[in-house]
Amino acid sequence: MTETDVMRAIEKKLLWLACWMIHNANHLRAKDEIKVGGHQASSASMVTIMTALYFSALRPQDRVAVKPHASPVFHAMQYLMGNQSRENLENFRGYGGAQSYPSRTKDVDDVDFSTGSVGLGVAITAFASMVQDYLKARDWTAPRDDGRMIALVGDAELDEGNIYECLQEGWKHGLRNTWWIIDYNRQSLDGVVREGLYTRITDIFRAFGWDVQMLKYGVLQRAAFDRPGGARLRAWIDACPNAVYSALTFQRGAAWRTRLMNDLGDQGDVTRLIDSYSDADLAELMENLGGHCMETLAEAFAAVDHDRPVAFIAYTVKGWGTPLAGHKDNHAGLMTQAQMTEFRDTMGIRAGHEWDHFEGLDVPEKDLKTFLAKVPFFAKGPRRFRAERVAVPDLDPPGDAVISTQAAFGKLLDAMAKGDSELADRIVTTSPDVTVSTNLGPWVNRRGLFAREDIPDTFRDERVPSTQKWRFSPEGQHLELGIAEMNLFLLLGAAGLSHGLFAERLIPIGTLYDPFVSRGLDALNYACYQDARFLLIGTPSGVSLASEGGAHQSIASPLIGMSQDGLAAFEPAFADELAAIMHWSFDYLQRDGEGDPDERTWLRDETGGSVYLRLSTRPVEQPGLGMTEARRQGIIDGAYWLRAPGPNCEAVIVYQGTVATEAIAAAGRVGPDRRDIGVLAVTSADRLNAGWHSAQRQRANGNKAAVSHIESLLAPVPREATLMTVIDGHPATLSWIGGVKGHPTLSLGVEHFGQTGTVADLYHHFGIDADAIVAALHRLSCGRPIRLAHS
């Protein structure tokens, strides 16, 4: 019994379990009225690759992003290794069961990278390798063995643009220890891929310095090519269109024979070669592509003796080994009951024993168990690490009387860079070519840019005056990126998983222009879905970036911050608010507690998460309020009274962000008794809204004492008082607050693209300046005119 024999038995078992798991979910288990799905054909094309990889090539330090549609094979493999339960497999794609696509946060098995949003699971492996190199350059731990960051890639995923953006970034940073294994089955959801795609793939990878390994022929085919007539058979295979090859695969042996004899039959060597195979053997030969040949795959993986990135292009058959093999409609196709019964018989599975670990295998159970117990990749058990939390030192806000939140952010980081705290050492910053214009320049000047080898600052060496010290070294703490926001969020995702992947804590901070959060939104969502931890700075924001025009002015980003799970969004107006939020954020990023809500706010703060700060370039006068504990807590919880409402309050001005100046000015002009006009400073509509919804759920479940922070704040405001909300962003960000207690509400904000101009021009144009607030209050405050103080 050879190792290859054992691995072929594993391959057979994984193919069966993956197909049965999907069949059970769609045909046997009670289900909803809609199709459950599960991709039997896409799983089948990956089964040999995953067997050869996991049971031969991988080491415990390696990390793998599994092709989304190969999820059933992954779960079947973990089930075979004792890391997944039968209950979860039986509930595949059901509530609480094994997930449709591998998930770090939803699955119980040992998922390295979540996948599902096509292409992102591929690209994050490159950034994880960069993070590994960054950690290796530090002296926090003893030298570690380099792990390979591996992606199992569907060939259709190569249509995704983020993959090619990633390749360029990898080239710039000297990418190492990265393997992408491409399941080249030449079929996508809607059909068969165009001819010659592999030549474009190879050209692109080689242009960026990758080693490209073409795994096209299996050992059976190579043996046939060495026989008389074999050269012509190989030439026919190479010239055969993808669609024809797929169709003949579906039609099986007799169809292969007819086509080959018609095209090649010569009454000589070729005819004798074809005639030497039975129909079944001929089909096996023609389907013995490199991606389905255990020996070919194992040899290719073992032969890599360098750390350059490698792209394996493994030819496969979609649906291999099943009745669906080769059919162009098999992507979402499912075996029928009759096909599954025939398939089960072919696999040697007895009815009622479909979930048995060793059913239908020729290898003795004892031998298989012995082999599985020694597989290196699984030898050390689950590889989900933990890292110690880093203490957060005090952050003192800059003392400027007039300053923007963006400038304050730069000064706060610069102050940290001057110090020697462990937190500062653990910070790694990154930005898509806007490092200086998002105020990371002072941090980078002090802490440097990262590269595995020293790169001198030529301008400095040539004595050319410059405010920026642009020196790269292994000690640097800034990772320079090109102007591609998808790469930014993928890098933040990889660095934000460092504690779980590599057992080392990083505090990643990424900055970008706030309107371009939308450019990388898919990757941002993907990073949050994995529970990556990072601090995102969106700046400059809103129409306050007046002279740049509508393309650089953000409208929807506050709503993105509110709706994105795993991301606590803030928009401070003042520098001391920002300092308090950043101090809290550095701790929040490191939390990993239970999900029970805090009974003061009903927020699940102990679980931790990432943080998004929406900052402005608009300098504003600082209020000089002093930082009491109550104000600090209100800033973190999402809002506090800048001016508490009086007993006869007719109106409350509710603002978020840099329009604080307009709200305060408007409040100062409204009478008769100015003390009764309330001004509510909102620092996080996201946290206020989340706490309100959470408290509502608590009350619905019987906890009548549950009161959210926003409900407590609005409790003293008379029901007939008007709420006037205002933000340099979409008005829906704050308009919901009127529904908390049923106050009449008018919401001011920005709903349309801006244009160039001054801040005053645009605030007036959009009706969010002090004059607009005052005029609106005059019209709407409980139907009674409000007397105005002199301007």
Image (cartoon, rainbow, N blue to C red):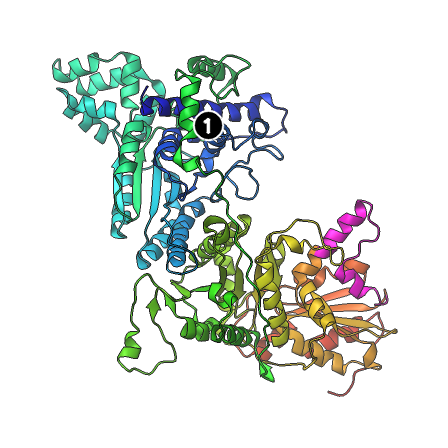
* Front in this rendered view, residue 211 or 606: 606
Q: Is residue 273 left or right of residue 586?
A: left
| Residue depicted at 72% across the width and 71% down the height | 629
Stretch of the chain drawn in magenta: 691-718
Query: Which of the 4 image quarters holds residue 733?
Result: bottom right
Residue 43 appears in view: yes
Up the image or down, 54 lies above or below 608; here it is above
Q: Secondary structure at mark 1?
A: helix
Residue most extreme to the right = 647
Q: Position of residue 223 (x, y in %)?
A: 19, 23
Q: Position of residue 690 (x, y in %)?
A: 69, 55
Up the image or down, 403 lies above or below 333; here it is below
Residue most extreme to the front = 142
The residue under label 1 is which amino acid type? Gln
- What residue did someone put label 1 on? 40
* Front in this rendered view, residue 124 or 53: 53
Query: Which of the 4 image quarters holds residue 2?
Result: top left
Up the image or down, 542 lies above or below 86; here it is below
